[in-house]
Amino acid sequence: MKRHHYFFIVFILLSFFSCNEKKQSLKLIKVTEYSSTKVSDSSLLKVLKKKYNLDVDIEYTLSENYALKQLSDKKADLVIIPNNATSEDMTIKAIIPLLPRVLMIMTNKNVKDRSLKDILENGTVYFEDSSRLDSIFFDKLFYSFNIDENKIDSKLGSTELKINEKSDSLKVYIGLMHLDNDDVRELIHQDWLFFSLDDIDNYGKGSKIEGFALMNMSVKPFIIPRYIFKGKPDNSVLTISINDILITRSDVHNEIINGITKTIYNNRSRLIQMNSVYNLLDFNYDNHDLSFPLHKGAIQFLDRNEPPVWSKYVKMIWPLISISVVLFGVFASFRTRFKRRKKQNIEMYYNSLLDIRSRSEESIDTDIIVDILKELKAVRVEAMKSLADKKLDPGESFNIFLALYNDTKIDLIENLKEIRLKSQENKA
């Protein structure tokens, strides 16, 4: 090859990488009212700026409707919002779950042997947040625990709760908060106690929390570990949580979303060093539990199917075209060889689903149906693991499996609701 050809290629590469280093800026809106979350947010923004060369301008709001509208109107590029949010805008896509908002219930007295219904209906209850999404969550929680909201003496904790004020009456503080919430730390300092929604020994054995989470897919059981707050609480606390999720629009470029996801994933240890609350980042999530479908850029990262470097720049680096053709032929040959075997592996998951459907149609016991739902989810988790390990072909056969899984899950949940409704009617 002539010398000037080499100079031409080097010039093109240098031009590309110099353009690629240009700093990008995005607008982020976060739905929250807690000032303590700004500390963890600053850690995330620093990592994105330093490791991904991305400047993020952040705005805080109390209104999820405002945040979603700003995103739809292209006045914002990213939004952090609780996972129980919904929107009719089909262009809104999820990127990644972030930190969980934990249901924290605290009391000024020891109420170990009392129920949630008892303490809420017979004490003064201070709610930390009054947002629409939290109201929807608490409506479902109260219904599930048979709590009459009209009997709750509710107040807004941020304006009416006086922590240092001594009182003989029962006070209850409740809210969906991040673990590093400053108000919680202050209450613990004043000897307030955490209230556990169920005995920790019941976890994994069909506890009330697992039943509530099963019927509300955006909710997960959560354990507040003992001694996490400078020696408190004395015992582990069983409660529930809802993740904040990072969302965007489908028209935001795949490479940007892929880069954001990869940066957060690859720098988790760095985030934890900056703020220990990032220990709660969970990348082994079920994307079907998210309120919005995944963005293509996030899917690309999860599938780890990024194209090789040479395929991106083949139009600029002509000598590599012939190499790409050869490599493609080799890849196609191996893919054809193993594709049939991968498709055959999906049959055992089909058989498991069909067996579950058969057993569920014969069952009228709610406990058995709950166990079957757990078994159903375990089959799906195993199939997704096989897909991630490239033991299955992510083609039409797997899509049919997912459709059959979803139909089975919906049928089971509807059957469970009908049985419980009939049971209530019979008792009445």
Image (spheres, rainbow, N blue to C red):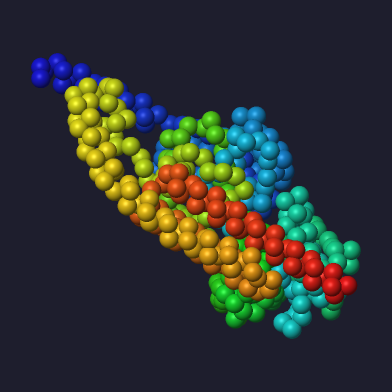
The spot of residue 137 in percent (x, y) is 73, 57
Q: Is residue 102 left or right of residue 162?
A: left
The spot of residue 326 in percent (x, y) is 20, 32
Quadrant for residue 409, please give it. Answer: bottom right
On screen, residue 319 above or below 63: above
Give the residue at x 65% y 70%. 363
Q: Is residue 427 visible?
A: yes
Q: Nearer the viewer, residue 126 or 91?
A: 91
The outermost residue toward the bottom is: 113
Give the residue at x 57% y 35%. 249
Q: Is residue 47 visible?
A: no
The spot of residue 283 in percent (x, y) is 47, 55
The spot of residue 148 in percent (x, y) is 86, 66
Give the residue at x 65% y 29%. 73
Q: Nearer the viewer, residue 344 or 100?
A: 344
The outermost residue toward the left is: 2
Quadrant for residue 90, please give it. Answer: top right
Image quarter where the C terminus lies is: bottom right
**Number of numbered callouts drawn:** 0
On screen, residue 234 above or below 73: below
Image quarter where the N terminus lies is: top left
Q: Is residue 147 left or right of residue 361?
A: right
Give the residue at x 10% y 17%. 2
